[in-house]
Amino acid sequence: MIYLSLSAPAAVDVAILNLAGRPVRALVANKPLEAGTQTLLWDRHSDAGPATPAGLYLIRVTARGMDGVQSSALATVVLR
């Protein structure tokens, strides 16, 4: 599971990337989310369909507030 906390409502993009920075899976794209803690689930599949192999991946979260301010965060996840 992926947890993120928003201080205000925002349009959110969440992408899973490989270590080279190439997209593996777009979990959400421009999805409006309310303020507070949000929970997202990645089923370990890529956008192409197959399950991703074990390894280290990046999670990139970008949130755009109604006022136009944008914030981004990057985290890692290890799949075993």
Image (spheres, rainbow, N blue to C red):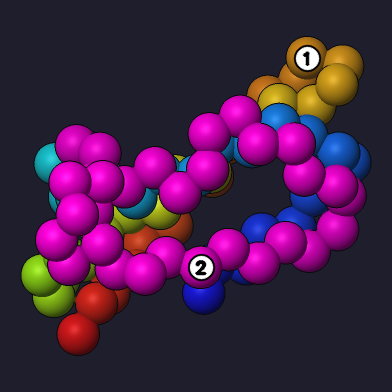
Q: Quadrant of residue 20?
A: top left
Q: Which residue is mark 2?
A: 41
Question: Residue placed at 42% from the left, 65% from the top?
Answer: 42
Question: Does 48 lie within the magenta span?
Answer: yes
Q: Position of residue 2 (x, y in %)?
A: 54, 67
Q: Which residue is mark 1?
A: 68
Label 1, residues with CA under 10 Å away: few <14, some 14-19, many ≥20: few
Q: Position of residue 9 (x, y in %)?
A: 86, 39
Q: Identity of the amino acid at label 1?
A: Gly
The earlier-in-sequence mark between 1 and 2 is: 2
Q: Position of residue 11 (x, y in %)?
A: 71, 31
Magenta region: which residues?
22-51
Q: In the image shown, does 17 or 47 lie closer to the viewer? A: 47
Compared with residue 12, is residue 56 higher up or lower down, i.e. above or below?
A: below
Q: Secondary structure at mark 2?
A: loop
Question: Residue placed at 40% from the left, 53% from the top?
Answer: 59
Question: Residue placed at 53% from the left, 34% from the top?
Answer: 29
